[in-house]
Image: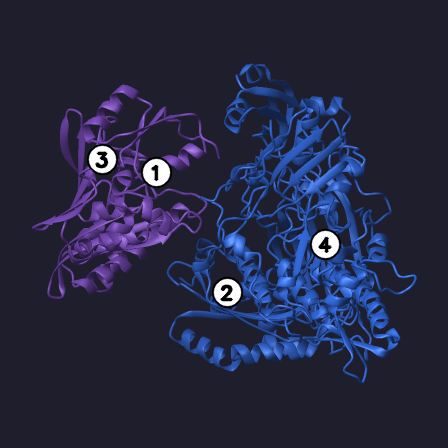
Amino acid sequence: MGKLVGQPIKRVEDNRFIKGEGKYTDDFNMPNQTFAVYVRSPHAHAKINSVDTSAAEAMDGVVKVFTGQDIADAGLAGSICGWQVDFKNGDTMKEPPHPIMVADKVRHVGDPVAMVIAEDKYTARDAAELVNVDYDVLGAIVDPKAAVEDGAAQVHDDVPNNTIYDWELGDSAATDAAFENAHHVTSLSYHNQKLVPNAIEPRAALAHYDANEDKYTLYSTSQNPHLARLVIGAFVLAIPEHKLRVISPDVGGGFGSKIFVYNDECGCLWASKQIGRPVKWTADRSEAFITDCHGRDHVTDAQMAFDADGNITGLRTKTYASMGAYLSNFSTCVPTYLHGTLMQGLYTTPAVHVDVTAVVTNTVPVDAYRGAGRPEATYSIERLMDTAAREMGMDPTELRRKNFIPAFDGVEQPGYQTQVALQYDSGDYETNMDKALQVADYESLKATRDKAKSEGRLVGIGFSTFIEACGIAPSAVVGSLGARVGLYDAASIRVHPTGKVTIHSGAHAHGQGHETTFAQVVADAFGIGMDDVNVIHGDTENVPFGMGTYGSRSLAVCGSAIMKSVDKVKEKGARIAAHKLECSPDDLEFANGAWTVKGTDKSVGFGDVALTAYVPHDYPADEEPGLDFASFYDPANFVYPFGTHICVVEVDKDTGEVDVTKYVAVDDCGNVINPMIVDGQVHGGVAQGIGQALYEGAVYDDDGQLLNGSMLDYTMPRADNFPMFETDKTETPCPHNPLGVKGIGEAGTIASTPAVVNAVMDALSDYGVKDLQMPLTPERVWSAMNSNGNA
Amino acid sequence: MISYNFDYKVASSMEEAFSMLAEAGDDASFIAGGHSVVPAMKLRLSEPSTLIDISKVPGMSDISQDGDTVTIGGLVTHAEVASSDVVNNACPGLAECAGVIGDPQVRNKGTMGGNVAHADPGSDYPGALVAFGATICLASASGSREVSAEDYFTGLFETAKEDDEMVTAVKVPASSASAYAKFPNPASRYAVVGVGVSLNMNGGSCESASVGVTGAADHAYRASGSESALAGSDLGDDALDAAASAAADGQDMMSDLAASADYRAHLCGVMLKRAVAAAKARA
């Protein structure tokens, strides 16, 4: 622990946020700007016969109306899929086009058909209602499993049986053999339901084409401005990259949904050039429900095999994963390389097989959403574990203890090679669970539960001991798996003449607290104060080419790039210091903000060296002036945080309501830079995971209409739904990155959902309720309790 | 979330409000706290040509008590009702009801008059007002009249109020043994089912009871079967079970994402029992 690293430093960015003075995309304006509104399909699946824009164009204040045909005439390709996953037989996956606006057929409610641009947003909104689209409504397909059946509505003509790919991982024969010889098999079938991300700030764009400079600027709500620039420039609009600047200012939450390069924002850039004026577009909440990429939507059958002693002998799953109507940028890797590869869990399971069929449906596209594949994997494994323990009459902690992978630090002991491609970096799972049991006082919890049950109250305890792969990702590895991008990151450190420091971060912050944690790391490294360090991010013309923020990667990957730059500064600084102290750099050690000749009191401070670097009057020969280094860091491996979450619930017998009464989260994310921010990430993640377990879920009817597309009907979890979360940690450093950090952004979401459902199933254990589908609404719970003669 | 275009006028007196309404025509709407009107406008489900802001109209912002009757002005906010000593002493069930409407922001802006005028089927007040025998005070340019809450709520967003009338106040008889129990919609926090109960107790026995139910059917109703089951009883388990099972009698239960008709009917009974227990404890 340093002076700052490891301390709960308050977030410097919160000063502007809590005063309402953050600057978001919609807060920016340009002279002569126009306002765009998209005309979106009210149907899930329909052929477009005609689009009549005449009434809209005749309205006062309307500048221009573009349609899907204009996009087709311009020969624009639309957004792309960034990850190729091939069929089992080697055929390339199906990759249907995803145009900026559609001309022929709409494929989900919200599919854009036209774009109205007006002098003000009110006129644009009114005029959008005057665009008259004549549709032939077609039958829709919503259910991922039914989508592959013959006769199901075909979302894309060239995607037979709506199947994008089928895919498998693991040893099928060995797994089947394990099941044939099993003493006990536990089976679950579930729908890991479709979730709406609901970031508090809707997506927005302010796009400008400057004809004089032949240059585009896009202010946008992106988690990764460089990725946006790459995709838009190289693929969607064919803009040379040096002629496109993407700025991601403050962004109000992403949760994955703002990773993706959406057609809507691209359309604004394209339109700006056509009309010669800036174009602003800001989604409203209703639009966000039907256009922001959703998460999850896996229909899964999962089975776990055990021997007579409770050792896991096999795990197999079959999943139908919906991609929605089109392939969003990373949709294809979520159910495969972010899901199948996690099926080892924390256990020594000797045979694992994962089978995934990815399908298109007439629903909003699905892509990575906080956790992305790993929550689905964890849900399968951890629900099976608690269920199996109940079926076999074992304590769920004992079943886990029996099957945990033994501790390994990745240095003295090698990493753990799983049955599903990954090699875990370091882990100590039993110690972590023991810590959680101690924090939660498990023995006393069990006594409380049993006493409550004897009094007729329904109290349950649920577990989730999870692992995730984050710090995404080694470029060569993901490239071999089909990724069409590298997943390094970049950062530069500019030491100013007065010894102040600016970090230019390739990772963008939208809630993660980079402006604080990155500054903590660098301030400690140079022995200077937090106030001496500033963090710049989110502008492709001001920061090096970074791949952005998702997959709990910022600190593990971009933080490592920062540390590489720190080392370069220190190396050059040592040479300058050596010159000033008339010694060799090897004679120096750096501590407390100064280079000191070992064994003496002769030293020169960081600020003196910085000044010397920029005022190089008395300076080493052959040394360049300045102290400014950029670095790229490509990780050697994923990082593998893990943890134990324990949830206690009480179910209201009369109404079926589930009350989460206690929640303990003991996470291991390696070394901790700022425990307050880590706690905050866990709190938010746990809340989101409880949201999936109890409250959230997109509900579609058979026609593909989203029935709960507003906050009146879609239940977001709120603070009064939760107890005070109790957090603690173990620290198993990552052996392969300079800070020894693992990432914490998604852990809470990944862990909590099965813990909550497991707790409810434990509470209902006397009711003969074997399983319930999420969300565990009061009516579902009450109906299940009253459907077995147990009213 | 941009509404259609509309005019906005501020009335400084009731007379001015009515003349503005007459002038603006059929598509005009009064607005006070805006928590019924504005959400519908933002979703473009409602398209008033003119909003006439009555929040500055004097004489409708007070809570007063005269004998056994509490009068709550149409502009009194839910937060004011919830925290009013007068209401908490005279009719604790109504204060309890006001305190569970929406969330703090809604309660700080939403008004009694607006809520009653809008008559959302999931609104909390109607269940309490029906149960507590409240009277709705209406005024128009041509005069004023009073309608019992039971007769006032007539259907889905439908009331006995004429288009040219304003809800100026609500009169509520004192009822110390009163309570309101609610099962909220987890998303909107409207009532999936809300039950108001007022008991007339004589020692341990219930001489009469009044039960109002909101959220369950398309408008708030009195559960007369439940009232009969409670009246003359000692509020023991048998009476409570009978009252609970009668709470949805004769009513078409709504069915939506939050609750099926059967589950709603069940919740009517559960909430009734909870409200009775709370009301009894206050007797």
Residue marked by disc 1: B34
Give me the C-alpha separation between circle 4 and circle 2: 47 Å
Q: Position of residue A1 (x, y in %)?
A: 66, 76
Q: Give left or right: position of B236 versus A597.
A: left
Q: Is residue A513 above or below residue A451?
A: above
Amino acid under label 4?
His
Name the residue that disc number 4 marks: A504
Chain B pictured colour? purple
Q: Nearer the viewer, residue A697 or A243?
A: A243
Q: Chain of mark 1?
A: B
> Left or right: B2 with respect to B134?
right
Residue type at numbered disc 3: Val
Q: Colour of chain A?
A: blue
Q: Secondary structure at mark 4?
A: strand
Q: Are marks 2 and 3 on the same chain?
A: no
Q: Which residue is mark 3?
A: B57
